[in-house]
Amino acid sequence: MKLLKNNGFIAFVRVNFYDGKDALQPNAMISLPPKEGDDYSHFHYLLDKRDDDFVIDKRQFSAFVGTDLDLQLRRRGIDTIVLGGVATHVGVDTTARDAYQLNYDQYFVTDMMSAQNETLHQFPIDNVFPLMGQTITTNDLLNILN
């Protein structure tokens, strides 16, 4: 994380709903959205998130829809993003599609993503992400940054 922070701007993105009023309405295909304080609204300690780091609270699948992520990136002159996260086929995929339409160059760090099963994880990596950017590993990213 230190190398990433030294080479650019990091926006930590999490799913977070406040009192449930702004949550997506669940249907048969989607489980109930997390509530404030659920594990989804906290960052794993290995991410080394600091109090002064930039945090985006998303309420939709995309990190761009309903947030100021695009504004914050453009203010800083950022035109390339690095994506990882959960779930590969939902949050990462939807964010990637929006980023592509907003004209961002993208790196997809495939070993920094996960999904409920290997099929859901692998399909966008093999079939969708290569259309919008480069699929790489964490080691590839470290080599690019060094």
Image (cartoon, grey):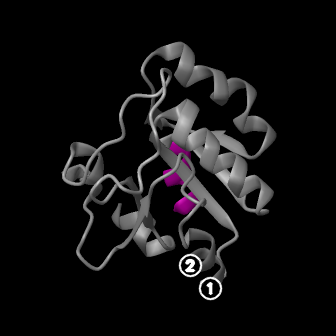
In this picture, is 54 found above or below 48?
below
SS at mark 2 in the image: helix
Residue 118 part of the magenta segment:
no
Tell me residue 130's x, y (percent). 75, 36
Estimate how packed mark 2 is, as few (under 14), some (14 to 19) or many (20 or more) residues with alpha carbons within 10 Å: some
Point 56% across, 42% down: residue: 92
Q: Quadrant of residue 99?
A: bottom right
In this picture, is 73 found above or below 36?
below
Task: Look at mark 1 in the image and give the residue it sits on.
Answer: 75
CA–CA distance in space, label 2 to label 1: 5 Å
Q: Decide which of 29, 92 is in the foreground and name it.
A: 29
CB of mark 2 within 8 Å of CB of mark 1?
Answer: yes
Q: Main secondary structure of the magenta part?
A: helix
Please indicate whether residue 44 sits to the left or right of residue 80 in the image. Answer: left
Estimate how packed mark 1 is, as few (under 14), some (14 to 19) or many (20 or more) residues with alpha carbons within 10 Å: few
In this picture, is 52 found above or below 30?
below
Point 60% across, 75% down: residue: 73
Magenta segment range? 139-146
Q: Quadrant of residue 4?
A: bottom left
Residue 140 part of the magenta segment:
yes
Tell me residue 100's x, y (percent). 76, 54
Instruction: Tell me the amino acid under the disc marked 1.
Output: Arg
Task: Look at mark 2 in the image and give the residue it sits on.
Answer: 72
Q: How many marks?
A: 2
Point 35% across, 34% down: residue: 32
Instruction: Tell me the amino acid under the disc marked 2.
Output: Gln
Q: The N terminus is located in which quarter?
A: bottom left
SS at mark 1 in the image: helix
Please indicate whether residue 135 sits to the left or right of residue 63 in the image. Answer: right
Q: Quadrant of residue 120?
A: top right
